Amino acid sequence: CANCKKLEAVVVDPGEGSDEILAAIAERSLVVRGIWLTHAHIDHILGVTALREATGAPVWLHPADRRWYDALPEQGRFFGISGLEPLAPPEHELAEGDEVAVGEYRFVVRHVPGHAPGHVAFLGHGVAIAGDVLFVDSIGRTEGDTPERAWPSRGTMVGCVVSCSCPSPPSCCRQAPR
């Protein structure tokens, strides 16, 4: 209808299933305002090009994960997927403490490295969009990008993620472990 307000949306971590995501967007007449990436492993970025081309939405990524983002074709080959093209550069960088929004909903960005060097979580409205730092009935994977940068313990990451919901997060949420 001409007087109806279109609902805004963001797509977070479009891995596989971009056709289904696009169908849901069309079915609900959503206006996609952004593609937010918690990190840039292949299972979180495989659908970026399709979503970006179909919606015109800009991509948001923490710069510490840019090397993974730029290496999509290499990630694909590692998992037996050939023919992947490099992704266009992200339009926006995410940083600890940034505020991102969709419609009236605002989320604070928390840098939670460990699973990936630029891993972030989006916190707001009683929700944590946490990518792979939290799994159902478990915390997420914590291998880091190299052994020397991996979290010293899963307990450290859990404390960081839980504490990041506070207005003033501990230092582990502000910088990568040494």
Image (cartoon, rainbow, N blue to C red):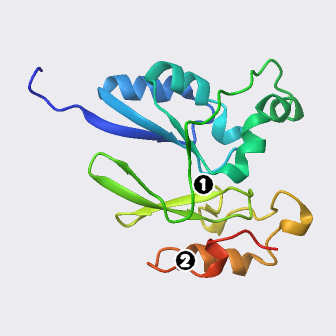
User: Tags 1 and 2 in contact by the CB under 8 Å rule?
Assistant: no
Q: Left or right? Give the position of 68 relative to 158.
A: right
Q: Amino acid at mark 1?
A: Gly
Is 104 or 136 nearer to us in this picture? 104
Q: Is residue 27 shown to the viewer in this render? A: yes
Q: Position of residue 49 (x, y in %)?
A: 60, 24
> Residue 73, position in %: x, y?
81, 28
Seen at 80% across and 35% down, the residue is: 71
Tag 2 residue: 162
Of label 1 and label 2, which has the lower sequence position?
A: 1
Placement of 4 over or under 165, stated as above or below: above
Q: Position of residue 31 (x, y in %)?
A: 33, 30
Considering only vertical position in the picture, is 106 above or below 165?
A: above
Task: Work out whether 92 lies above or below 110.
Answer: above
Say which quadrant the C terminus sits in: bottom right
Which residue is located at x 31 percent, y 37 percent?
8
Element on which disc 2 rests: helix
Q: Which residue was labeled with disc 1?
A: 131
Q: Is residue 108 above or below residue 91?
A: below
